[in-house]
């Protein structure tokens, strides 16, 4: 049962990834990425990491990809043009890809026990505890420092984004007001002229 | 229990829940039309059947029989799949909701819950967050500027309010120490209304935040900007007709029911009665099994009533007000609630 589900969803995942590269329309590519992410979530679930699966769906498929599609829709991006790629990309890129895949494959083949190991082995049923209990215990005791450092990192990123956005915003706003002001002045000028002409 | 039995039971439960859910959707529409009618001092539907009770069935037949128009400019694959995503996600999330006490007959699994998942709450949140794509893709693929505006508004609104929605539920999860919906309800069961999370659990603010964010999540008034008729003609479903339009319509009401179920489970004690264990459970097995369902349905009904009441009363927010309210009020309030609940749990006198 697990094997069948694994094959089906791994297939979905690969098909989505290939479709992502082949599609020329940004929206379809984004949707393929969602398929990849949801299938990955199912694979996590099969490995017994249900919290990770739920987080994957909620955070990646539900929030980040919504923003992706949002931006694509907002920019109303058209179809991409197809090129055959530069000569450098063809002559260096393909061998490089083959080399990387070969390295990964050798590592996986060397580590024979990898296929048998499951994420859930370390994480479930010590004494009826759920995955979530154990995960949070590990996260807030053994891995506390990396966890907190990561959250601080994300906080810095948020602050950076806010700083960048507000800086540009204030500049645009300022110029906008100035433009508006001059426009209003022009209109008043025009009105005044009109009145004067009417007077005359 | 063999795997065949398991599959048969699951199919049976799914079929029953789907039929009940769709009937619920149909009659929620009628409830809304009747109630809004009364609020506006008119009768609402009265002609079809006694008190207009057959109106939903006739409406359903009408949407089936209407001409199904696909405009020429649309991006067909996404245009066709969008209503399916919307309705599918709306119906899937009900699968983890426990409707009654765990009862089993002759070796069956729990009768009143399709599947008892130990991350039930996260499943509901996840499926709901996927449901955004139904609306977003509908708006984009329709090739219509009003639809696109509706879709953009909707995705921004849903992403913003999802945060407040999720954070408002954290307090309850902290109190229970579990994401399993059945355990969350059982945790509230002991003293009836006094131990419900909304009163005994001091989660009143969380309930208010959840309520507000849920209205925004389901695109309901006063946050129904994605389909604001006066600005966007019809919003994201402007170009849809016949059954495809009806699917969006049904998805909206199914989401309302799901949100009502989650509110009932998280804050209002789920299927437990107002009196908790203070009155002894009835001896008759049938009543013992069905009384919890009655309480559950009653609570969800009250929630839906409130939904319609709000719709009949409050005017629509402006878009900037919507965003300000979500980010500047609801989100900090939800975080404060988490901090307060954590402090209370850490320093409370008794354990």
Image: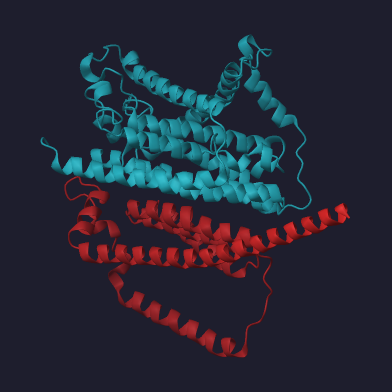
Chain colours: A red, B cyan
Q: Residue at x 17, y 59 (%)?
A: A141
Q: Is residue A155 visible?
A: yes
Residue B94 to residue A66: above or below: above
Q: Quadrant of the C terminus of chain B?
A: top left
Residue A2 to residue A23: above or below: above
Q: Nearer the viewer, residue B287 or B338?
A: B338
Q: Quadrant of residue A85?
A: bottom right
Q: What x and y, as percent, mark residue A169?
A: 52, 63
Q: What x and y, as percent, mark residue B261?
A: 42, 31
Q: Quadrant of residue A52?
A: bottom left
Residue B254 to residue A29: above or below: above
* Extreme-top residue of the structure: B50
Q: What x and y, as percent, mark residue A13?
A: 49, 61
Q: Residue at x 81, y 59 (%)?
A: A193
Q: Nearer the viewer, residue A187 or B173?
A: A187
Q: Residue at x 47, y 47 (%)?
A: B324
The number of discs equals 0
Q: Nearer the viewer, residue B171 or B184?
A: B171
Q: Quadrant of the N terminus of chain B?
A: top left
Q: Quadrant of residue A73?
A: bottom right
Q: What x and y, as percent, mark residue B305?
A: 49, 23
């Amino acid at each position: 049962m697990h094997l069948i589900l694994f094959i089906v969803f791994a297939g979905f995942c690969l098909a989505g990834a290939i479709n992502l590269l082949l599609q020329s329309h940004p929206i379809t590519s984004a949707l393929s990425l969602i398929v990849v992410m949801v299938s990955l979530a199912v694979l996590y679930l099969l490995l017994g990491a249900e919290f990770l699966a739920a987080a994957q769906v909620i955070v990646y498929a539900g929030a980040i990809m919504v923003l992706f599609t949002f931006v694509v829709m907002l920019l109303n991006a058209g179809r991409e043009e197809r090129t055959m790629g530069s000569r450098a990309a063809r002559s260096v890129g393909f061998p490089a890809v083959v080399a990387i895949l070969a390295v990964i494959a050798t590592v996986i083949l060397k580590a024979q026990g990898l296929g048998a190991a499951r994420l859930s082995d370390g994480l479930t049923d010590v004494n009826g505890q759920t995955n979530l209990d154990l995960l949070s215990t590990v996260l807030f005791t053994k891995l506390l420092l990396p966890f907190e450092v990561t959250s601080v990192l994300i906080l810095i990123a948020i602050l950076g984004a806010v700083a960048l956005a507000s800086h540009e915003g204030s500049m645009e706003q300022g110029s906008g007001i100035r433009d508006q002001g001059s426009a209003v002045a022009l209109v008043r000028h025009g009105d005044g002229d009109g009145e004067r002409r009417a007077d005359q | 229990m063999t795997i065949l039995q398991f599959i048969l039971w699951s199919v049976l439960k799914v079929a029953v829940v789907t039929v009940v859910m769709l009937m619920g959707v149909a009659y929620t529409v009628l409830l809304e039309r009747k109630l809004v009618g009364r609020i506006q001092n008119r009768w609402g539907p009265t002609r079809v059947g006694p008190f207009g009770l057959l109106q939903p069935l006739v409406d359903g037949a009408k949407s089936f029989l209407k001409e199904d128009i696909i405009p020429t400019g649309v991006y067909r694959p996404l245009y066709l799949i969008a209503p399916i995503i919307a309705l599918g996600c709306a119906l899937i999330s009900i699968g983890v909701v426990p409707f009654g006490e765990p009862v089993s007959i002759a070796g069956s699994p729990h009768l009143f819950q399709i599947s008892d998942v130990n991350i039930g709450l996260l499943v509901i949140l996840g499926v709901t967050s996927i449901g955004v794509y139904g609306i977003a893709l509908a708006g984009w693929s329709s090739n219509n500027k009003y639809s696109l505006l509706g879709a953009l508004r909707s995705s921004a609104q849903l992403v913003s309010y999802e945060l407040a929605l999720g954070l408002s539920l954290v307090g309850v999860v902290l109190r229970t120490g579990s994401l399993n919906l059945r355990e969350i309800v059982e945790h509230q069961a002991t003293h009836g209304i006094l131990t419900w999370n909304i009163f005994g659990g001091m989660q009143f603010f969380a309930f208010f935040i959840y309520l507000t964010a849920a209205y925004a999540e389901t695109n309901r008034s006063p946050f129904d900007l994605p389909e604001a008729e006066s600005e966007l003609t019809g919003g994201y479903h402007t170009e849809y007709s016949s059954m495809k339009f009806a699917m969006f319509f049904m998805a909206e009401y199914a989401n309302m029911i799901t949100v009502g179920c989650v509110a009932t489970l998280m804050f209002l004690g789920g299927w437990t009665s107002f009196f908790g264990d203070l009155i002894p459970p009835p001896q008759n097995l049938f009543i013992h099994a069905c009384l919890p369902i009655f309480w559950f349905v009653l609570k969800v009904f009250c929630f839906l009533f409130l939904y319609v009441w709000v719709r009949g009363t409050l005017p629509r927010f402006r878009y900037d007000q919507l965003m300000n309210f979500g980010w500047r009020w609801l989100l900090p309030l939800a975080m404060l609630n988490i901090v307060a609940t954590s402090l209370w749990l850490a320093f409370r006198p008794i354990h």
